[in-house]
Amino acid sequence: MRKNIPSSISILFLFVFIFTSCTPPSPAPTATLAATFTPVATITPEPTASNTPLPTATALPAPERARYILNTSIDYDAHIVTVDETIYYPNHTGNQLNALVIAIVPNLWEGSFNLSGLSINSTPITTYNISGQRLDISLPSFFKPEEVMIINIQYTLNLPFAEQEDPSVSRPRIYGYTRRQLNLTNWYPFVVPYVNGDWVLHDPWYYGEHLVYDSADFEVNVKFADPANAPIVAASGVPEQRADSTRYTITAARTFALAASPEFQVSSLQVGDIIVASYYFPLSKIAGRAALQASAEALQIYSQKYGPYPHKTLSMVMGDFNDGMEYSAFFYLSRDFYSLYDETPANYLIFVAVHETSHQWWFDQVANDQAQQPWLDESLATYSELVYYETLHPDLVSWWWAYRIDFYNPQGFVDIPIYDGQGFRPYTNAAYFQGAHFLSELRARIGDDAFFEFIQDYLAQGRNKIMTTNDFFRILGEHTRTDTSDIVRQYFQNIY
């Protein structure tokens, strides 16, 4: 399989990089990155439409996206979260609806999700069914296209202890708490996408991601039971300090995630008008700052290669578990990667940090069905690692192919669902690593200009949407007449 990737981009790398408390050595001058890094000052939230309450009448013109308001109280020591949630949900399905499906992922853990109130347009709802992660609601009247529904949900989360290993599951659980960290991921009820007449909520699996998200706006108000001893918080979105709480806002996002720990240390950078922050535990300062630098570099590279980063913050968190995971303007990195960091760019911490950074394009901006077509975000995120290395560290491109990809002798078709992966390693070999080979061969066949014009257009056409494999090849066909059918047959079990 072809691995002849361009080894350098011969433009000057102008990069002034200042940590809040130290300045590491500058990277080699092999690329031009326009943004200048400066120490972080007080973050002032950008005014957004989400800060203006919507009227309660359902006859309003429908907004572009759903809006979630989460008034949240956290008892850190007791591991209890109390939430009063309001969802402004516009019916953009094109159909009259007499039912809703809402994901309540915390209910997968016995006793974790406790519903105390549910109403729609101020009418209490008593006809509903909860089964696992699924809440089915029968609506009191038909919900017409382009109407706005106001859903109120009150609930309490009893967070599970996340360090208990489950041998039936291939990856550790993130949602819950550990001895030194609280993690809120997929922690709030959300209306699942409605696609081609069906509500999309797949069953969880032993590996991979099963959830699919519409783009939405979030306002999350967080208050701790003991404000005087509140932990340090990392979260999606721009923070605004209030008298006894913090308000976070983020627009056009797929998810809202939050992590808290009294032990977190923080290093931050400013890239243009974007705050990039790294949260890590005390013994991992060097690695935490290295992950920050790599992510900030990747953010600039992907903004140039693909299109602009859409949010005002990006937070990376050292997870007190051995897994990484992406969320909007937020991602986790495995604690083992910090422990194994060797102070060079040729290691897991760096390439996984830039991988997760790229998910802000291939997951957050352009979504896909992560259960049925996971290759769409994972192949692009894995290939984005290569884009990072060939831009800043061209001497490591061969190492990346050998160590990251070909060491595992990847096989299989790229376009497998998570359920057909036959195990974690065969699944990642196909969806991630074979996917990187496919994109490499595609780029070599059609040329750099056509390839990156196609990727930029895929981002532009797919922004805030849920894209499919058919969309990928449709847009590709708009940018090249070169015959790529042999490459597609080699890597795909279904020909598009």
Image (cartoon, rainbow, N blue to C red):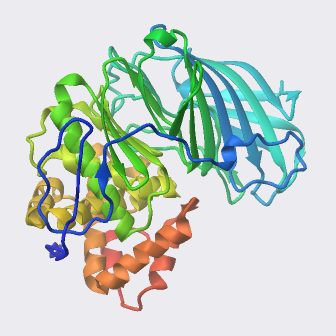
Of residue 454 and residue 291, the one placed in the foreground of this image is: 291
Name the foreground residue: 65 vs 13: 13
Looking at the picture, how far across and down is residue 229, in whole percent? 43, 10
Horizontal and vertical percent position of residue 165? 32, 21
Q: Position of residue 127 (x, y in %)?
A: 83, 28
Please identify the quarter of the rendering in which residue 444 is found: bottom left
- For the point 39% across and 37% down, the residue is 206
Q: Is residue 237 above or below residue 187?
A: below
Q: On screen, 137 above or below 480?
A: above
Please tell me which residue is depicted at 23% across the width and 63% down the height of the picture: 386
Vertical arrangement, residue 435 with respect to residue 312, above or below: below
**Is residue 168 shown left or right of residue 61?**
left
Residue 107 visible at all:
yes
Query: Where does residue 329 sit, x and y in percent of width and height?
Result: 45, 45
- What residue is at 60 percent from the left and 32 percent from the top? 220
The image shows a total of numbered marks equal to: 0
Write down the quadrant of residue 112 in the picture.
top right
Q: Which quadrant of the view contains residue 343?
A: top left
Quadrant, the N terminus: bottom left
In this view of the protein, which residue sits in the foreground, 37 or 200? 37
- The residue closer to the viewer here, 196 or 423, is 196
Furthest-bottom residue in this view: 481
Asked whether, in this view, residue 279 is left or right of residue 250, the answer is: left
Rendered residue at 14%/45% (across/down): 24
